[in-house]
Image (cartoon, grey):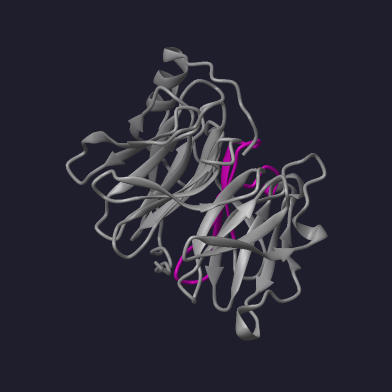
C-alpha cells in the first residue's frame, strides 16, 4: 500500500453502508468500521479475524460473536503496521515498519495478546506475509523489492528480481502460495509475479503470471480452491479476480482503497484502508471457498 491521508468522514461511511450494490458482480457489506486506516487482515484457524491499524500499531480482534477488541499494540513510533498472518496455533504475525532497528521486523503475538519481536528485518517496508511448505514465513518488502524467508527468528533474502521493483517505489506487495510457487503482487506495475519454489527450497526464476491495467495498485492477494486469484486495488478502489486462464475481471468497485484480504470458507474478508474516509472491515460472499492456507 501507499501512504494515504486519513480523512474521516461520517458522510463517506454512511454512503458506504447505504450503497451495498457497489459491486460489478459482488455485494460487499460492512462488518466493522474503524477510526484509523486499516491495512492487514487475517483469519485464524478458529475463525477469529484480526485487523491491523496502519498508523496506531493496534491489532484488533473480531470474534464470532461480532465483538471487536484490542489484541495488542505494537511499538510503531512514526512507522506503519502492515501485513498479518496466523499460524496453526493461532499466533498472529505482523509486519511492523517502525524504522527503528530494535523494533523493526516481524512480530509474533499470541492469541492472548503477548507480543514479541520474532525476526528483525532491514529498514524498508515489510508488507505481505505467507507461510510456505517448509513452515517458514515469506515476507515481501515493497521498497527493497525482495521476498524474505523468515524461519526460527532469522530472516534472509529468498528472492530478488527486477520484476519485483515498482517504477514509482511501490513494488512487491501481497503474496500467496499456490501449487509449488509464490505469487507476488507488484503494485506499480499492475502485475502478478510467479516465483517457483525450487529444489532445496531455493527461489526459481520469477516470471510475470499476469499483467493487466485493472491490477494497478494491486495489494494483498488470495487464491480460491480452483486457483483463481483475488486482488484488491487501492488505487482503483476495486476487487478483481484473475481467472485460471489469465483473464482479469472486476468483481466489486466503488470501494475505499481496499488492501489485504482473507478467506473464511466462501466468505471473503477485506479491509478498506479508508483514504476516502471510511476505513473498515468488509465481507462478501463468493462461489468457491478459499484455498486452505499453509499455516507454519
- Against 189, residue 288 (above or below) is below
Looking at the image, residue 111 sits to the left or right of residue 99; the answer is left
* Residue at the spot 42% in from the left edge and 28% down from the top edge: 19
Q: Is residue 268 visible?
A: no
* Residue at the spot 35% in from the left edge and 53% down from the top edge: 43
> Quick one: 114 or 161, which is closer to the camera?
114
Per the rendered image, the range of residues in magenta is 215-242
- The image position of residue 286, as x and y in percent, is 41, 56
Q: Is residue 66 visible?
A: yes
Looking at the image, residue 123 sits to the left or right of residue 63; the answer is right
**Is residue 241 shown in magenta?**
yes
- The image position of residue 127, as x and y in percent, is 58, 47
- Against 33, residue 239 (above or below) is below
**Which corner quadrant of the image does residue 281 belong to?**
top left
- The image position of residue 175, as x and y in percent, is 58, 58
Looking at the image, residue 153 sits to the left or right of residue 42; the answer is right
- Against 288, residue 129 (above or below) is above
Quarter of the image with the C terminus in it: bottom left
**Which corner quadrant of the image does residue 293 belong to?**
bottom left
Looking at the image, residue 91 sits to the left or right of residue 290; the answer is left
Amino acid at each position: 500500500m501507499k501512504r494515504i491521508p486519513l480523512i474521516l468522514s461520517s458522510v463517506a461511511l454512511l454512503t458506504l453502508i447505504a450503497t451495498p450494490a457497489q459491486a460489478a458482480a459482488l455485494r460487499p457489506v460492512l462488518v466493522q468500521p474503524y477510526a484509523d486506516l486499516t491495512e492487514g487482515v487475517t483469519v485464524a484457524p478458529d475463525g477469529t479475524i484480526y485487523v491491523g491499524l496502519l498508523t496506531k500499531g493496534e491489532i484488533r480482534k473480531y470474534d464470532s460473536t461480532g465483538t471487536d477488541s484490542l489484541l495488542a499494540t505494537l511499538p510503531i513510533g512514526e512507522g506503519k503496521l502492515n501485513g498479518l498472518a496466523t499460524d496453526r496455533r493461532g499466533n498472529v504475525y505482523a509486519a511492523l515498519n517502525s524504522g527503528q532497528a530494535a523494533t523493526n521486523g516481524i512480530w509474533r503475538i499470541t492469541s492472548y495478546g503477548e507480543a514479541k519481536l520474532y525476526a528483525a528485518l532491514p529498514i524498508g517496508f515489510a508488507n505481505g506475509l505467507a507461510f510456505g511448505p517448509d513452515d517458514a514465513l515469506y515476507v515481501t518488502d515493497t521498497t527493497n523489492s525482495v521476498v524474505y524467508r523468515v524461519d526460527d527468528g532469522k530472516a534472509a533474502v529468498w528472492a530478488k528480481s527486477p520484476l519485483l521493483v515498482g517504477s514509482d517505489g511501490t513494488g512487491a506487495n501481497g503474496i500467496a502460495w499456490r501449487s509449488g510457487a509464490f505469487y507476488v503482487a507488484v503494485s506499480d506495475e499492475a502485475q502478478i509475479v510467479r516465483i517457483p519454489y525450487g529444489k532445496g527450497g531455493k527461489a526459481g526464476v520469477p516470471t510475470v503470471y499476469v499483467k493487466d491495467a485493472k491490477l494497478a495498485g494491486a495489494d494483498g492477494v488470495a487464491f480460491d480452491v480452483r486457483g483463481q486469484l483475488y486482488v484488491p486495488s487501492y488505487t482503483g478502489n476495486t476487487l478483481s479476480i484473475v481467472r485460471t486462464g489469465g483473464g482479469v475481471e472486476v468483481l466489486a468497485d466503488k470501494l475505499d482503497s481496499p488492501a489485504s484480504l482473507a478467506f473464511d470458507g466462501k466468505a471473503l474478508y477485506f479491509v478498506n484502508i479508508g483514504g476516502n474516509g471510511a476505513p473498515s472491515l468488509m465481507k462478501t460472499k463468493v462461489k468457491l471457498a478459499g484455498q486452505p492456507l499453509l499455516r507454519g
